Image (cartoon, rainbow, N blue to C red):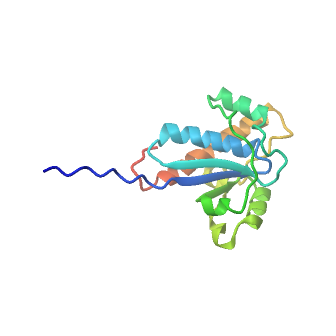
Amino acid sequence: MSVPLQPRPQPEPIRVLFVCMGNICRSPTAEAVFRALARRLAPELALEVDSAGTHDYHVGSAPDERAQEVARAHGIDMSGLRARLLVREDFERFDRVLAMDARTYRAALALAPREQRRRLRLFMDYAPQLQMREVPDPYYGGAEDFERVYLLTEQAAHGLLRELADGRTVAL
């Protein structure tokens, strides 16, 4: 008599939220870059990825066209993303809330429930080799500033993936 195989339980996804001020430049770039790298380098990881802003300037808007152009040049389409506001519940839902700079970090920290504050970090902590703590805001800059944001988020995304894959059977 054969015993039916039981389906393997699906692992709980690791939930990652990227946060900047308006959620149209840095955090959607980080979300799109991280999502693309994870798909390519660590498809075994169960992930849920999103981005949000600490200010409601652009809620519902697509990412800045300059950010989209840079992403497209690197083979990533982020046109479907829409800006949203960071809310208190995000700290309960996401395992990691990653701020792009100190100002965003402070705004997110003020919103975070005390018991969830440990989930908040600076995104550049995952790229210590760059000796940078912040992803600079490119909004008032030019194309080169958006390219720099892309490259910085790519470095930090690699570091984050390495940490998430640590202890799992994922080769990066």
Depth check, front residue: 26 or 159:
26
Residue 73 locus on image (x, y percent): 67, 27
With respect to residue 60, does 93 lie above or below? below
The residue positioned farthest toward the bottom in the image shown: 114
Query: Quick check: can you spot residue 128?
Result: no
Q: Quadrant of residue 138?
A: top right
With respect to residue 145, does 101 lie above or below? below
The residue positioned farthest toward the left in the image shown: 1
Residue 58 locus on image (x, y percent): 82, 44
Q: Residue at x 65, y 62 (%)?
A: 91
Query: Quick check: can you spot residue 52?
Result: yes
Seen in the image, is 139 located left or right of residue 14? right
Q: Residue at x 82, y 51 (%)?
A: 56
Depth check, front residue: 107 or 142:
107
Number of dots carrying numbers? 0
Depth check, front residue: 151 or 8:
8
Residue 30 locus on image (x, y percent): 66, 44
With respect to residue 74, does 154 lie above or below? below
Residue 26 locus on image (x, y percent): 73, 44
Seen in the image, is 61 located left or right of residue 130? right
Seen in the image, is 100 located left or right of residue 45? right
